[in-house]
Amino acid sequence: MASPVTTSDEPLTPAGRLFLQPQTNVVIHCILRGQSPGDVDAMKSNIKSSLMVQHPRFCSLLVRDKNGFEHWRRTHIDLDRHVIVIDKRLDRSGNFVDQDEPEGSTTEEADEAAVNQYVADLSVTCPLSVDKPLWELHLLTAHKCAVFRIHHALGDGISLMSMLMASCRRKDDADALPRMVPDKRPEIRGGKGRDWVWLFGALWWFLKMVLHTLVFSMEFVLRSFFVSDEKTVITGGDGVELWPRKLVTAKFVLDDMKVVKRAAPHITINDVLFGVVSYGLSRYLDHRTPNALREGLRMTGVSMVNIRAQPGLQNLSKLIKNKSDARWGNKFGVILLPVYYHKTPNDPLEYLKRAKATVDKKKHSLVAYFSYWIGDLVMSLLGSKYACMLNYKLLCNTSFTISNVVGPLEEISLAGNPISSIKVSTSSLPQVRPKCKFW
C-alpha cells in the first residue's frame, strides 16, 4: 500500500531495490550453534544494547510511495515481535516433537538435521513481514541454536557478518571484540638496477589484466543473456526458487584444508574450497547419472566478490559512515567460476591445480567491478524490474553459486553463550548453493 513520503524517509539503494523484486527476494539465514541453550532474556538484553538496533537499516520500515519507489522509515522496535522463542524440539523432518526427550538422548547430527530442515522450510514458507523492520531472530533453545533472518536489502554478507561480530565478544575476554583477519597488502620492493625489470613486469601484468578483463566481461555478458549450462541433475531454472528445499551441512576441518593447501605452491584456502567443490560435483554427477554425461561438461558457478576498498570483515564504525570507502550495504560484484565433469577418477590434486589457475585468472581482472557497473547501469537506466531480469537470467543460466565469509581469529560468544559454529544460507535462488564456513 502506498504511503506518503516524509522528509526523514531515506530511499533504498539500487541493490536494495533489486533484492525486493519477487524473483530475487532474498533472505539471509545465519545459524549460530551455541554450547548451551542460552538465556533468552540475556539475548534480548544483548540485542537491545547492541549497535544493530541503533543502525538505521535495522530500525526502519520498508514503505512505498505513490509511484512505487521504496524508502526506509524509522520506527520503534518491539523486540518481542522480532525475537521468536521456540522451546519445543524438532525432528529431522522439521516437525515439532510432542514429548520432551531427556537431555543427551539425541545426537548432534540429529539436532543439526532438524535445524537445517527448519531453516529450509522458512526459506519457502515464511517471508519476512513488511510491517516491521526486515529481520528476525529465532531462538531454538532445545537445539542450542539461534537463527538470524535478515533481508538482503539491508546489506551483503560482509556488512551483516561485521554487524554480527560487533555484537559478539571473545570467549576468553568478555569485554573484548573479536579480532579479524588482518588486511594483507603486498609490499613493493625496489632497488638499484631493477627499475627496468620492474617496469617490464608491471607492463606485462597490466596487459594480462586488460586481456582477462575483456575476455571475462564478454563471458559475463554472453552468460547473462544467451549461453546457459547443459541440463544436469543439479541444474536449476525458472521457478526452482519456489520448490521445497533441502539444507545439508558438509563439514571440513580447517587443519585438513591447510594440509591440502601445502600440497601445491601458492595455494589459498579458497582455492582448496573451490577444488573440493569441483571434484565433489564430478563425483556426485557420476553417482547420480552414470554414463549419461559427456566428458568435459561445463558447469558454471556464480561467486559473489566484495569490491570494497578494504577486503574482509569491516570495522562497523567505518561501514556506517556515508563517505567511508568501506560503505554499508550491498557492495559486491560477480565472477563466473567454471568446473568440468570428468568421469575417470583423476588425481584430486589436479582439480585443485585447475581451480587455482581459474581463480587466479579471475582475480587478475576487473570483471567483478564490471559486473557491478553493469548492474548499476541497468538499474539506473531501466529500473529494478529489468535489473532483476538480468540477475535472474544469469542465475538460471548457471548451475550453482558459491560464497564464503571469513570469521574471527578466536572463539567467540554471544550474550555469554560460547558459539561453536556459524552457517549461512539464503532463500529464493533458482539453483543449488554451496555455502561454506570453517570454524
Image (tube, grey):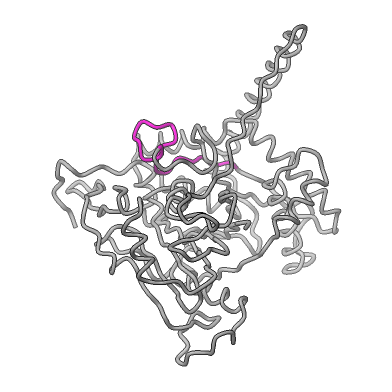
Q: Position of residue 321 (x, y in %)?
A: 35, 36
Q: Position of residue 293 (x, y in %)?
A: 75, 60
Image side of residue 286 versus residue 134, left or right: right
Q: Residue at x 69, y 52 (%)?
A: 273
Rendering quarter of residue 377: top left
Rendering quarter of residue 290: bottom right
The verdict on residue 329 being magenta is: yes
Please name whichever residue, 112 or 357, is drawn nearer the observer in this view of the structure: 112
Q: Position of residue 54 (x, y in %)?
A: 30, 50
Image side of residue 324 versus residue 255, left or right: left
Q: Residue at x 17, y 48 (%)?
A: 66
In this picture, is 211 found above or below 152?
Answer: above
Please name whichever residue, 118 or 75, is drawn nearer the observer in this view of the structure: 75
How many labels were placed on the picture?
0
Q: Residue furthest bottom?
A: 99
Rendering quarter of residue 130: bottom left
> Magenta region: which residues?
318-335
In this picture, is 191 found above or below 294?
Answer: above
Q: Position of residue 271 (x, y in %)?
A: 70, 46
In this picture, is 367 found above or below 154?
Answer: above
